[in-house]
Image (cartoon, rainbow, N blue to C red):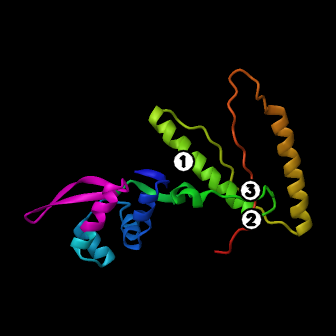
Amino acid sequence: MQDVVVIEDPAVAAIALDPVRARLLAALTEPASAAALATRVELTRQKVNYHLRALESHGLVEPAGTRQWGGLTERLFVATAGSYLLSPAALGPAGTVRVKADRLSASYLLAVAGRTLREVAGLVRRAARAGKPLSTLTLDAEIAFASARDRSAFTEELTALVADLVSRYHHESAPDARMHRLVVTAHPKPAD
């Protein structure tokens, strides 16, 4: 089972977004039979089997063995990922985000996050096909600003520091240079 799978195919998105199928995916972090799932999600085994076939045909669940129960052999299934994310690409042309490059707007942050999701999902697929690891870096921190003035000063200082680092390490014309994208975002942390 993969940690995270990004869904980019509209047909797969439609299958995963069905409320019953989404419940089954959430319940299949551990192998289970249709009968066991039926009890958990309060559906008939026949309905669960129907939905499992749809999920399996779209690569969202996979067989995880069999088990004898009474005189029957039950097939076990497991989700192909612990979590699923929906790429803007799954929405086709409607998923293309068009916003002004305003680094202080929430719309631009969402557009960049969508682009990052789409790009990294593609890179993960290509790296897996090539049998190579994908080098990435993620920094995730929380900061409590005492005032709007502190937040503004932090933004200016961080921007200057990042610009300085980029100017020191950016060597686009180097023979084996590989372009990387750096995204730094900040947003208020939602209350839990």
Neighbour tally class for label 2: few under 14, some 14-19, many 20 plus, Cα within 10 Å:
few
Neighbour tally class for label 3: few under 14, some 14-19, many 20 plus, Cα within 10 Å:
few
- Where residue 188 sits, quadrant-wise, is bottom right
Distance CA(mark 2)–CA(mark 1) = 22 Å
Q: Give the number of marks.
A: 3
Would residue 77 be counted in the magenta stretch? yes
Distance CA(mark 1)–CA(mark 3) = 19 Å
- Looking at the rendered structure, which numbered label has been put on residue 185? 3
Q: Amino acid at mark 3?
A: Thr
- Where residue 192 sits, quadrant-wise, is bottom right
Residue range (magenta): 49-78
Horizontally, is 20 left or right of 49 in the view? right
Q: Looking at the picture, how far across and down is residue 104, in whole percent?
A: 81, 61
**Residue designated by label 2:** 106
Question: Which label's residue is closer to the chain start, 3 or 2?
Answer: 2
Task: Find out whether the residues at labels 2 and 1 contact each other: C-beta distance under 8 Å.
Answer: no
- Where residue 71 sits, quadrant-wise, is bottom left
Can the viewer see residue 142 in this picture?
A: no
Looking at the image, is 167 positioned above or below residue 175? below
Identify the secondary structure beneath mark 2. helix
Neighbour tally class for label 1: few under 14, some 14-19, many 20 plus, Cα within 10 Å:
some
**Residue designated by label 1:** 121
| Residue lying furthest left | 71
Q: Amino acid at mark 2?
A: Ala
Horizontally, is 55 left or right of 95 in the view? left
Q: Looking at the picture, how far across and down is residue 181, in whole percent?
A: 70, 42
The mark closer to the camera, 3 or 2, is 2
